[in-house]
Amino acid sequence: MASLHSDACIPANHWHQATLGTLIAQEDPRAWRGYSTEAWARSWGNHELAARCAAHPELRRKLSRDETWTICHDAGIDPDLRVYAALAYGSANMGPGGENNWRVAGSMPNLLPLLAELPTLTRAEAYERFRQLRRHRFLRGIGPSFFTKIMYFFGCKGAYILDQWLAKSILALRAQNWRAGACAEPVFELIDGNGIRLSFGKGEGIRDSVGGLDYDFFCRELEALTEKLGLPDGAEVERWVFSAPKSDWRLFLNTLDWTSPGTHKKRRDAVARYLASRRALRVEVAAMSFQITLGNHACA
């Protein structure tokens, strides 16, 4: 599995200490088990894929992280089925329709040649290879959350999964995204300069603008947390940070404002314009009052 890099080079003041304390204090997340690959395929109507999965007993049951890793390295299972097992582990686009999963199926011929190369590439190189394929629309339906799962499970050294929960966790832990409020209370506000950027709207995905070096830094951040969390490697840190759907950590993340930095700036600019107009109005009213007073004195 992905291993710890010995020198993560992340300074201690990089972290927001109160948020780090919240992460450390959570209970050990229960081991996540994704859907069985067969049930996952059936949920979005790919009955042909479900029938192929039925020939493999391990693809007919829910898999742990370690079991998914083992399957992705099992040469006795077709490569595309191994990719689908990784996506089923993440419960990707479950349910009727599954249009994105059909796009993944159509992109499989462009994806499979890269799988064998992953163990020979650095995580930054692999990420950029995926980005290039996606930029040219060769990987339709496969965004950063998907392909970092594939990088991790197919043996790209030091690669970890980057989805919205990992991204939000790291962004919340960065001290640069916290400021003092009006009463000195801590306020979370995303700033410009975060290499990991969430998609617009509710921030439920990772932007395509995130590059290989941004991803590498995110991985180094996970590795730098090993000692603080008392965990053996970056993969275990990722598991801890990913947490569980109803965990206190996820509830905490859901209380934060994930508005993009640009929107915050627009709001501040709008407030500044409003206050400036109010000040100008007060000056104008004061000047008019002064002129009226002068006029009254002149009449007297």
Image: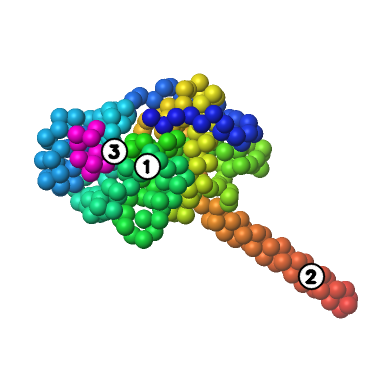
Task: Classify mark 3: helix, strand or loop.
Answer: helix
* Mark 1 to mark 3 CA distance (whole Å): 15 Å
Question: How far across and how far down the image is residue 3, in percent?
Answer: 44, 29
Question: How far across and how far down the image is residue 281, in percent?
Answer: 70, 67
Q: Residue at the location (28% across, 35% down)?
A: 72
* Mark 2 to mark 1 CA distance (whole Å): 72 Å
Question: How far across and how far down the image is residue 9, in percent?
Answer: 60, 34
Q: Which of pointers 2 and 3 lies earlier in the amino acid sequence?
A: 3
In the picture, which quadrant includes the C terminus?
bottom right
Question: How far across and how far down the image is residue 255, in percent?
Answer: 47, 39
Mark 2 = which residue?
287
Q: Are marks 2 and 3 in contact (CB under 8 Å)?
A: no
Q: Quadrant of residue 118?
A: top left
Q: How many marks?
A: 3
| Local crowd size for mark 2, using a 10 Å CA cut-off: few (<14), some (14–19), many (≥20) | few
* Mark 2 to mark 3 CA distance (whole Å): 71 Å
Toward the bottom, the furthest residue is 299
Residue 53: in sight, yes or no?
yes
Residue 187: in sight, yes or no?
no
In this orientation, which residue lies closer to the viewer: 79 or 137? 79
Mark 1 = which residue?
118
Left or right of 198: which side holds 151?
left
Q: Quadrant of residue 242?
A: top left
Q: Which residues are magenta?
A: 74-84
Q: Which of pointers 2 and 1 lies earlier in the amino acid sequence?
A: 1
Residue 226 lies in the magenta-colored region: no
Mark 3 = which residue?
86
Q: Residue at the location (28% across, 47% down)?
A: 112
In the picture, which quadrant includes the N terminus?
top left
